[in-house]
């Protein structure tokens, strides 16, 4: 795992080079979440809304919305997909995103409409990590995690 300015950046994930990560699962679904720099930038997450299971979300539309004391925004999908699972724990304890954005605080799992091309617009590996370093520098982020 790469680290930069205290931010964890797993090389195996796919990134939109802004604030969303994606992880392809063995069953053909894709798990989505927000990055460590994004959770630091947003501040303590106070509210999470996630589309319901069964909902088809078009590419570019939001699968979830997040609110903190200083920021509110959506979590856009880079592909069209059907929500097959959502992280119910986030609905009760939104700041889990500030504690563990890559594991316990995944947001939704989706079945892409076009699995072969679902991640075409996303980036991974060294290219993604370099671009995320630039994003961190642009916003002057020093990552920090909340505790319980």
Image (spheres, rainbow, N blue to C red):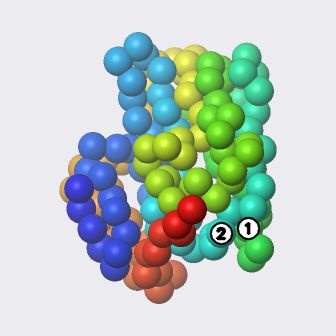
Marks 1,2: beta carbons within 8 A: yes
Q: Is residue 125 above or below residue 84?
A: below
Image x and y of residue 13, in percent = 34, 44
Res 14 label: none
Q: Is residue 54 above or below residue 17?
A: above
Side (left or right) of 8 relative to 20: left
Image x and y of residue 39, in percent = 56, 64
Image x and y of residue 123, in percent = 36, 47
The part of the image, by quadrant, that contains residue 121 is top left
**Residue at 41% from the left image edge and 13% from the top image edge:** 27
Q: Which part of the image, by quadrant, shows the C terminus?
A: bottom right
User: Is residue 77 among the parts visible in the rendering?
Assistant: no
User: Is residue 91 among the parts visible in the rendering?
Assistant: yes
- Which residue sits furthest top? 27
Out of 128 and 70, give the one closest to the viewer: 70
Side (left or right) of 14 relative to 16: left
Mark 1 neighbour density, 10 Å: few (under 14) some (14–19) many (20 or more): some
Res 44 label: 2
**Residue at 72% from the left image edge and 21% from the top image edge:** 53
**Residue at 30% from the left image edge and 52% from the top image edge:** 10
Out of 71 and 102, give the one closest to the viewer: 102
Image x and y of residue 25, in percent = 39, 24
Disc 2 is placed on an element classified as: loop
The part of the image, by quadrant, that contains residue 83 is top right
Disc 1 is placed on an element classified as: strand
- Distance from label 1 to label 2 (Cα)? 6 Å
Q: Is residue 36 above or below residue 32?
A: below
Q: Which part of the image, by quadrant, shows the N terminus?
A: bottom left
User: To which residue does mark 1 refer?
Assistant: 68
**Residue at 68% from the left image edge and 53% from the top image edge:** 94
- Which residue sits furthest front? 148
């Amino acid at each position: 795992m790469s680290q930069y300015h205290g931010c964890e950046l797993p090389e195996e994930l796919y990134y939109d080079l802004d604030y969303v990560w994606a992880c392809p699962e063995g069953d053909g679904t894709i798990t989505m979440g927000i990055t460590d720099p994004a959770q630091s930038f947003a501040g303590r997450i106070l509210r999470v809304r996630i589309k319901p299971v069964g909902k088809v979300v078009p590419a570019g539309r939001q699968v979830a919305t997040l609110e903190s004391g200083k920021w509110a925004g959506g979590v856009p999908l880079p592909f069209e997909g059907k929500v097959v699972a959502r992280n119910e724990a986030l609905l009760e304890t939104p700041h889990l995103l500030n504690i563990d954005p890559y594991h316990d605080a995944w947001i939704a799992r989706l079945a892409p409409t076009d699995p072969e091309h679902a991640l075409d617009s996303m980036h991974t590996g060294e290219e993604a990590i370099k671009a995320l370093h630039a994003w961190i520098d642009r916003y002057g982020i020093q990552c920090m995690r909340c505790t319980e």
